[in-house]
């Protein structure tokens, strides 16, 4: 009983971390000087036109165990942007015209590679003057580091700067009547840092960027989602067992397992499309290769210890209804008392 109590405490701690780790990561735009020579405009207003949750700008992984956090601006997108631009791109000439920036998309993402992490900022902006659209641009910028979370703020500022420079270039092209004229933003560094930043796209048709971004996201979400686990009461009612889950869709997976002595088969319903999303496990469990059979319903999750290898702990806890039990096994297991209709189902182990 002591061992089961300790396991329950450990599992509850694991699930609390899994369920509530998606806290908030607040981003505050720092001040820098956006240098656009002979600038013809200044930003008078910023409008948040995104179709998504207005507070949400992406998911970052931070903390000791790289927990997922929802990223947002300190005082909302509109306040953050206009405060930043009034300082970093202030009006310096009476001939500069007031412009309204309409933000249609602004999202940050992170991607793990074998050697490091990549952080991306994706922005789509329309520029208006007197309610007339003058220009549209989309920018997709990336930064590479061992831990990119702290670099998202500077990466966002770079994407904003590239959008403003593209708008100014369009004004100059229109003024000269030369549609072939191009100019480039000098330097390729994250503002106010010495980290290299890579501009992955220049202004292109929105359908091309959206299709490419959606395709990349779909591939990243869907690949490598099968899970292998090894541990106590994994693979059935076993002292130690092995279980393998095959993810058949974004929210469903099937799994098979076996161990000493027992086996299991069932279905997992995930709460999200990603590999490490919490899940509900409905499964048939065997103990002693025929001594006891049961139907279990458990809630489970994973705690990632290594982002590069996706190695971590897996735990699940719930109830199992006894379907059949050998009389001698029942007397031994429940100390000569009748088996209850349902018993605790727990499992904990390593997974990858």
Image (cartoon, helix red, strand yellow):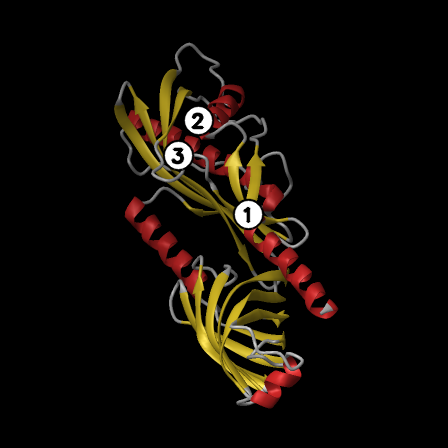
Instruction: Provide the secondary structure element on which disc 2 rests.
Output: helix
User: Does the residue at mark 3 contact the one at mark 1 (Cβ under 8 Å)?
Assistant: no
Dot 2 crowding, Cα within 10 Å, few <14, some 14–19, many 20+: some
Q: Quadrant of residue 315?
A: bottom right
Name the residue nearer the viewer: 101 or 39. 101
Q: Which residue is mark 3?
A: 166
Q: Position of residue 274 (x, y in %)?
A: 47, 60
What is the CA distance from the residue labelled 3 to the residue labelled 1? 36 Å
Q: Which residue is mark 1?
A: 22
Residue pictured at 41% horizontal, 58% vertical: 216
What is the CA distance from the residue labelled 2 to the residue labelled 3? 21 Å
Q: Quadrant of residue 14?
A: bottom right
Q: Residue furthest front?
A: 337
Image quadrant occupied by the N terminus: bottom right
Q: Which mark is residue 316?
A: none
User: Considering only order in the chain, which callout, 1 or 2, is on the residue closer to the N terminus?
Assistant: 1
Choose mark 2 or mark 1, whichever is in front: 1
Q: Quadrant of residue 116?
A: bottom right
Choose mark 2 or mark 3, whichever is in front: 2
Name the residue nearer the viewer: 38 or 240. 240
Q: Which residue is mark 2?
A: 78
Residue pictured at 64% horizontal, 38% vertical: 193
Q: Position of residue 271 (x, y in %)?
A: 45, 57
């Amino acid at each position: 009983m002591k061992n089961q109590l300790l396991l329950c405490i450990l599992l509850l701690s694991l699930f609390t971390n899994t369920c509530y780790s998606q806290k908030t990561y607040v981003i505050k735009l720092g001040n820098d000087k956006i240098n656009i020579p002979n600038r013809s405009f200044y930003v008078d207003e910023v409008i948040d036109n995104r179709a998504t949750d207005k507070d949400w700008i992406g998911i970052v992984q931070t903390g000791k165990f790289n927990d997922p956090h929802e990223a947002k601006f300190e005082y909302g997108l509109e306040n953050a942007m206009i405060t930043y631009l009034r300082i970093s791109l202030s009006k310096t000439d009476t001939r500069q015209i007031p412009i309204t920036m309409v933000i249609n998309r602004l999202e940050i993402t992170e991607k793990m590679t074998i050697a490091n992490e990549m952080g991306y900022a994706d922005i789509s902006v329309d520029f208006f003057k007197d309610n007339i659209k003058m220009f549209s641009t989309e920018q997709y910028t990336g930064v590479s580091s061992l831990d990119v979370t702290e670099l998202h703020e500077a990466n966002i500022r770079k994407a904003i700067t590239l959008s403003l420079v593209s708008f100014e270039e369009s004004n100059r092209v229109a003024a000269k009547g030369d549609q072939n004229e191009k100019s480039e933003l000098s330097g390729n560094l994250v503002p106010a840092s010495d980290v290299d930043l890579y501009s992955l796209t220049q202004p292109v048709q929105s359908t091309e960027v959206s299709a490419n971004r959606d395709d990349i996201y779909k591939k990243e979400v869907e690949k490598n989602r099968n899970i292998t686990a090894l541990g106590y009461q994994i693979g059935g009612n076993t002292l130690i067992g092995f279980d393998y889950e095959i993810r058949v869709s974004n929210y469903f997976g099937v799994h098979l397992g076996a161990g000493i002595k027992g086996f299991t088969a069932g279905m997992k319903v995930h709460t999200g499309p990603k590999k490490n999303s919490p899940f509900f496990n409905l499964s048939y469990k065997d103990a002693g290769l025929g001594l006891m059979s049961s139907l279990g319903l458990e809630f489970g999750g994973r705690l990632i210890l290594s982002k590069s290898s996706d190695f971590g702990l897996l735990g699940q806890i719930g109830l199992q209804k006894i379907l059949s039990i050998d009389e001698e096994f029942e007397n031994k297991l429940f100390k000569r008392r009748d088996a209850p209709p349902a018993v605790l189902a727990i499992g904990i182990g390593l997974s990858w």
